[in-house]
Amino acid sequence: MPQSNTRNRRIVLASRPQGQPRPHDLRLEETPVPEPGDGEVLLRTLYLSLDPYMRNLMDERGTSYASAVPLGEPVVGGTVNRVVASKHPQFRAGELVLGNAGWQDYALSDGKDLTALGEMPQPSLALGGLGMPAFTAYVGLLDIGQPKPGETVVVAAATGAVGSVVGQIAKLKGARVVGIAGGTDKCRHAVDELGFDACLDRHDPSLADKLAAACPDGIDVYFENVGGAVFDAVLPLLNLHARVPVCGFIAHYNGDDAPAGMDRLPAVTSAVLQKRIRMQGFIILDHYATRFDAFRRDMSEWIASGRVRVREDVVDGLEHAPEAFIGLLQGRNFGKLVIRVADS
């Protein structure tokens, strides 16, 4: 189902998911391609980023940093776009830009949310290895985790868009890195391709015991982006003065109620107090003004030199975004998940 020059395909939020999103929660529809007004640009989507945070914005309450997606409107999302037509003095037709067009072929922008990209050989990197997920890894690990040579860093979702970069940067800083990922193939990739010292399968019923064996000196930094049983296995192993950057908890995004089992709060607060743990949540939007230039400089050099490797999971066709997104929340993707909406 290729792009049209006259029709705009949009995937809109048809109903608010109850737990795990279902295909009927997301509807593909067509509208006319909009016309830019004064001060606006018309964008054609080339690549669409799929990220776990989108699930939170499907709920009626949204989040503290972003409003909920209105019913009947396109799902939000970062995009790489071509400017089709421009009535804006700072952008010209044909230009490649980073934007927020969402789950649709075309969108209008007033230019405030656009970043000129120049001509990139691999434009999709602006959504992953040179974009928001890798920036999240960079800030969370270096500013909050602050790994030191010889320390043990543990990261869950270790082959995902964020976790894979966390582990590789930690290795660059001289740390010992243990990943946790979903399946033997992902674990093998983390060790053989990304350079992790060890990687454990999160599905293994003996995860807690195997993590303890893999971290004989305890855990100094745990990059939290999953929660659930993984955090339960990590908590007893955290060392005195451990640092825990928190950027997400994907294991709970589809839950409507409190997690089953015992109340974990007393154990967490007791560990934070007695071990003097620094556990800090962060929203990456807060850091673009102060840290993004340094990130782009460092990450561009690391990727160009092969010191950081980036794997993409590219799905062709906007119409396949709902299925791919549901799979993302179930851990089926392998690397940064990107929808190729149109050729560059």
Image (tube, helix red, strand yellow):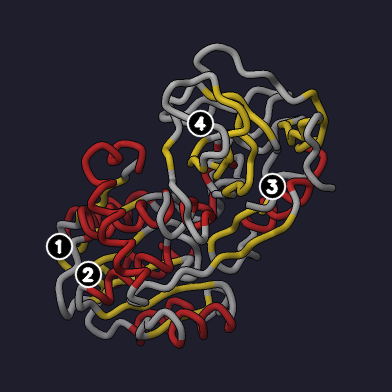
Q: Amino acid at mark 1?
A: His
CB atoms at circles 1 and 2 under 8 Å apart? yes
User: From the viewer's perspective, is the residue at label 1 or at label 4 nearer?
Assistant: 4
Q: CA distance from mark 3 to mark 2?
A: 33 Å
Q: Is residue 234 above or below residue 205?
A: above
Ranked by sequence position, the earlier of labels 3 and 2 is 3
As drawn, the label of residue 92 is 4
Check disc 4 and give the amino acid type: Arg
Q: Secondary structure at mark 4?
A: loop
Picture coordinates of residue 255, whole percent (x, y): 60, 45
C-alpha span from label 1 to label 4: 51 Å
Q: Which residue is mark 1?
A: 241
Which residue: 44% across, 46% down? 117
N-terminal of the pair, mark 1 or mark 2, is 2
Q: Which residue is mark 3?
A: 20
The image shows residue 277 at horizontal and vertical percentages of: 20, 57
Residue at 49% x, 40% y: name it. Answer: 97
* Marks 4/2: CA–CA distance: 49 Å
**Quadrant housing residue 26:** top right
Task: First in sequence, mark 4 or 3: give its number.
Answer: 3
Q: Which residue is mark 2?
A: 220
